[in-house]
Amino acid sequence: MKRVKKFKNVEELRKTIDEQEASRQQEKKRVIVVSSGTCGQARGSLKVIEALKKAIREEGLKDQVMIRVTGCHGFCEAEPNIIIYPDRIFYQKLTPPDVRTIVKETLVEGRVVEKFLHRDPLTKERAWYENEIPFYQKQKRIVLGDNVFVDPTSLMEYLSIGGFRPFLKALTRMKPGEIIDTVKQSGLRGRGGAGFPTGIKWEATHRAPGDIKYIICNGDEGDPGAYMDRSVLEGNPFRVIEGMMIGALAIGAREGYIYVRDEYPLAVRHVTLALEQLYKAGLLGEKILGTDFSFDLHITKGAGAFVCGEETALIASIEGRVGEPRQRPPFPAQKGLWKKPTCINNVETWANIPLIILNGADWFSSIGTSGSKGTKIFSLVGKINNTGLVEVPMGITLREIIYDIGGGIPEGKAFKAVQTGGPSGGCLPASMLDQIIDYESLTAAGSIMGSGGMIVMDEKTCMVDVAMYFLNFLRDESCGKCISCREGTQRMWEIVKDITEGKGQPGDLELLEELALATKEASMCGLGQTAANPVLSTLRYFRDEFEAHIYDKRCPAGVCKSLIRYAVIPEKCTGCEACKRACPTGAIQGTRKDVHLILYDKCIKCGACLEACRFEAIEAQREEAIAIVREVKP
Amino acid sequence: MSVHQLINLEKVQEIVERHGYNKNKLIAILQGIQAVYHYLPAEALKTLSKLLKIPLIDIISVATFYRAFSLTPKGQHVATVCMGTACHVRGAPKILEEFERQLNIRREETTEDGQWSLETVACLGCCAIGPVVVVDGDYHAHTSIRKVPTILNKYRK
């Protein structure tokens, strides 16, 4: 890490940025970029880095090659991966021995090692360079893109890509009103989910009476299946902080908080390191760069409560209290943290600010649709080939994201639905694939933009089970303040759970809809108001699946345990004994090369045999016994 | 770690001092205490109540609201199964059940010998490599039912 010095004035900082930028331009060394966010590390990137260092030392290339360890690039499927600059050769899914081969072949001999290149899941073609990979081609990575270029633990690295130029511009050449006008004109809307225009929020906080004002970065990314905020905080924390400093200038805040989830240890570490360096450099604290601008920024760790993503609950949590939302108005812009005017924005929103200030409102508003400007990062996960973070311009279609960028569904299975917006969102079916993505159109379709989770489901996903999953999540996370949310989510969960267990009755769906509406109408905060969305949207598009569970006692996807039993398909069974070895209860009989048999009285339906079988010879069949249950019921 | 182990309460004092006896830092202080003892011992909370001059009931209210806090001691090893949506559609519930079978405890419980605690988390945010299981801070990617015994054995001596 390069050493940080204290900047006494604007000129010193400007000079250092110039120098750092120039030294990057003149970099003669080859640079190997290793992606090492949480996903990368989980897949062994730290061992890859060790092996890389060792191999480079052994080949005597230390003076010619530099290793840059960065945050997540978004292509999580391909972790651990490296990019070799200047050619941008992209090698993926590496292990330490692979790295030694690469150093010998590519760095010493100058040959590309084909087997480590990315192979497109649809066309089976290999891509030599990063920019040839279809996953990246349709993306517009204005926020995530820089993750490739910076070591997130080094302020000097951030300066070398022109970091803090936007802040200098705002500090020296713009009045608070001009900054707010620029953000307003850009059309930027909150990336946390609700999509409130950022500039208007800033203006309201700026105009609110009082000397003490606060700004907050909401990094309590609680939506299961969404992790773009984690990647931005891990991979480019300085960008977020710079956005907040510009916000503080515009709003007139002297103090701010970054609230990060407890479940994101690496993000917490990188933000903490960034803050330390910025204080050392004199870019945070009293009289920044010798001007009248003073700004203190703290990090607060969450403690594992989903509802704290709601702004008033988050504020309560920073104040050290139980994270229960409160009635609005007054909005935080009038009465927020410690009853002072407070502007609270999401991580991705703050990260967009420096770009808007540097490139202007027109540049930003030229991207996107009429009502939704700029780009949005989605986490494309679930049953999809290219899982990862994708940053796309607003207005792109679901089909483009899932097929062109995501490479379609694995194992040739059929696409069934995509869930957007987390527990507050909904499931969209195949008929909506040509839907464009912006705030309005997703709401019209019965889902929401939300923080950007996009969970793809295939024919083997049961939509009733998915509805139950979200209801279980919400009943657990409801803070319990409003009875409609506390009891509504609980009752809806019980009804859907019964349906998955074959205990559904005629009239259940109507009751569900009624409860869903009551929960929506009578709850105070966003959690309760949107809690019904997963149920309503699955009922809207997949009612037949609910009906199959209720009337036929059948789970079409073969997921709901009470309605299925596992059986061996004799024609496909090769008698390899793989399932027999995997079975924890000894429920599978059969000798080698003979068709196996599952003993139902011993089977606990754990699914280990299904997972172990390589010949698709295990099948989830309808549980016949259920028919009897149905007859007994009135 | 035995439940009856004497708690060194000086550590609590240190943590409170580090946060300047600030009542607003209650959550951070509780996080600090949990980092030391791996749970929130009753004695520590009583001491905290006196030091910060807040009623014990208010501390308990915060400690039980947030999922990150535990009022009971944790096992030597902690296995956390991610229950996020992406992990769910890839079979996380079955993996959790396999952990329950292997350890012979239910989720959010600790084995009698104090070796293992089994926990769940709403989402760890590494959805691409799901189903994910974290044991003592190590991330295990793409887990499956059959990998569960292998993962457990890695931590058994």
Image (tube, coloured by chain):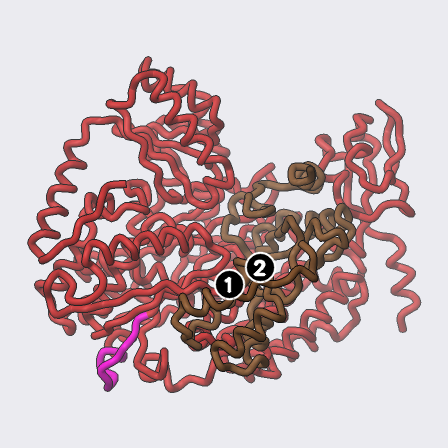
Chain colours: A red, B brown
Residue at the spot of label 2: B37
Q: Is residue A370 left or right of residue A77?
A: left
Q: Chain of mark 2?
A: B
In the rendered image, the residue lying farthest to the top is A109
Q: CA distance from mark 2 to mark 1?
A: 10 Å
A208 inside magenta stretch: yes
Residue A151 placed where, x, y %? 31, 42
Label placed on residue B11 = 1
**What is the quadrant of residue A68 in the picture?**
top left
**Circle 2 crowding by C-alpha within 10 Å: few under 14, some 14–19, many from 20:** some
Residue at 22 percent across and 64 percent down: it is A285
Between residue B98 and residue A63, name the one nearer to us: A63
* Secondary structure of residue under mark 2: helix
Q: Is residue A455 left or right of residue B3?
A: left
Between residue B12 and residue A65, name the one nearer to us: B12
Residue A424 visible somewhere in the drawing: no
Residue A83 placed where, x, y %? 35, 31
Q: Amino acid at mark 1?
A: Lys
* Secondary structure of residue under mark 1: helix
- Say if mark 2 contacts mark 1, CB within 8 Å: yes
Residue at 19 percent across and 43 percent down: it is A160
Range covered by the magenta-colored residues: A204-215
